[in-house]
Image (spheres, grey):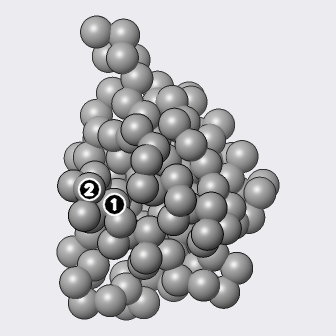
Amino acid sequence: MTSSNVQPRIFVVEDEYLIRMLLEDMLADLGYQISAAAGTLNEARELAKTTELDVAILDVNLDGEDVFPVADILTSRGKPFLFVTGYGGQGLPDHYRGRPTLQKPFQIEDLKATLATLAPV
């Protein structure tokens, strides 16, 4: 937790419920709070428009659909995000290849290091 007692707010987009719960637990352990969580592309798109967040974590493949429309919304809002994928950065469109990406499966240390560059606690 930061000295000002304000926890960075994380928007989590992950279609696999157990992975989403594990990720939320990791984030809590690292001192982040969950501002919103979504498991479908439609839900994620709606939440991406209005959720107050400091950073988003986006699973690239949501039940066979690409998460990039959500990334586009967050980009238009000027909100930072990182991708989580089992396929590596090669599966990202060219304009998103420079974004932070975590390869599944990842450890809490990897998550902490990547988030530290976007929303340090």
Task: Answer few, some or many: residues within 10 Å of disc 2's Cα (few below 14, many 20 plus, some between 14 and 19).
Answer: few
Residue appearing at x 43%, y 76% in the figure: 69
Q: Position of residue 40 (x, y in %)?
A: 67, 68
- Establish if 25 lies above or below 100: above
Residue 63 falls in image quadrant: bottom right
- Establish if 43 lies above or below 107: below
- Establish if 53 lies above or below 4: below
Mark 1 residue type: Leu
CB atoms at circles 2 and 1 under 8 Å apart?
yes
On screen, residue 15 versus residue 46, left or right, reads: right
On screen, residue 114 versus residue 59, left or right, reads: left
Near-viewer residue (116 or 4):
4
Residue 82 falls in image quadrant: bottom left
Q: Mark 1 sits on what residue?
A: 74
Q: Which mark is residue 55?
A: none
On screen, residue 45 versus residue 25, left or right, reads: left
* Disc 2 from disc 1: Cα separation: 5 Å
Q: Mark 2 sits on what residue?
A: 77
Residue appearing at x 62%, y 61% in the figure: 43
Asked if residue 14 can be seen in this view, the reply is no
Residue appearing at x 52%, y 83% in the figure: 66
